[in-house]
Amino acid sequence: MDPRLCARISANGGLVTRTEVLACGLSDDQLKRLLRAGELVVVRRGVYARACDWEAWDPYVELPRQRARAVHLMTRTDHVLSHDSAAHELALAILRPTTELVHVTRPLTRAARTRNGVKHHGARYRPEQVIDVQGVPVLDAARTACDMAREHGIQGGLPTFDSAMRAGVTREQFRVALEDMAGWPDVRAPRACVDLADPGAESVAETLGRLLVMEVVGPDVEIETQFPVLTARGVMWCDLRVGCHLFEVDGRLKYRRDQEGGVADRPIEDVLWEEKGRERDVCAEGLGMSRIIWEDFWGRKRSSAVARLHEDYARTRERLGDQLPARLAEFAARMRGRRLGA
């Protein structure tokens, strides 16, 4: 491939338009030959990427991000990336939707419409809500989280709220973003998310796990995230705590080697063995524990999971009561202060 074209693609972060290809000195015939040879792939009409880059990009974050950037490059009217597309640009967590779309918000469009894989939202936004991410206009994290909840509901929006709070967004900033949405459709979902958001959830699965546990214990019972327990193995941080019962959310990634897209840096049997010892030592401190997996969040398995977790929680209450032992509560308070930099 022409080195001038390679340099342009790299400078653009992976994409190049037809106009830029021609500006590099290539002809339309040469462009067609690169496409036929499989060296370039079409991301969107008039926008291309190197095949080697396209195959290497992560399918859950980077590919949707590049598709959205391609739409931005070919959109001539005033717009910003928003919703899922903004979340990807801002590195915010999202619950992957059933149908993946590029989302843009256009202030001069009245109603939302979807065409050619792009959802055009007609909505106003304030200039100070727009930030530049490598030359791409994107709505900020507080506005994006609110848009996500309006678009996908509480379950689809809360992971982005939690992620935004981990990135430093405050509840007050969410509320300011919501002031502009008074009277908008589906605004109740982001309002609920403002109250439910918790930066202690470190993944989408942990956010969904918290909603599942809320269904088990009721909306008025406090659910603590990232609860520390001092054991013989050191301090163990547990995902969720209610009373004397812990709920651990298990994802597949920790059971996959890093070369397979996971996070395990040693044999899987070692990971499982350590996990069993960790659970034994934590429970030995006077706590009960349940484990939650991804399948527990959906369909009929959710009902079964709620019943199972309710039984586990009830047994812990019968055996250990509702009140967390003072030594565990005091240690958790000290560790929480250190974790928050107090």
Image (spheres, rainbow, N blue to C red):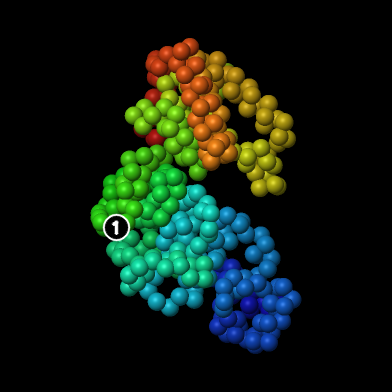
Residue at image position (33%, 43%) is 192
Residue at horizontal 64 percent and vertical 64 percent from the top: 54
Residue at the farthest front position: 300
Point out the image quarter for the N terminus.
Answer: bottom right
| Vertical comparison of 324 with 227: above or below | above
Residue 164, x across and y down, in percent: 41, 48
Residue 231, image quadrant = top right
Q: Residue at x 58, y 19 (%)?
A: 281
Report the residue marked by disc 1: 184
Residue 111 pos. (x, y %): 35, 68
Res 283 → quadrant: top right
Kind of residue indicated by mark 1: Trp
Element under disc 1: loop
Q: Position of residue 63 (x, y in %)?
A: 58, 61
Instruction: Determine whether 85 is above or below 279 in the image.
Output: below
Residue nearer the viewer, 251 or 231 = 251
Say left or right for 279 vs 206.
right
Look at 43% across and 52% down and name the residue there.
Answer: 152
- In front of the other: 219 or 76: 219
| Residue 309 horizontal/vertical position (percent) | 51, 26
Is residue 314 among what the camera can see? yes
Vertical placement of residue 82 versus 249, above or below: below
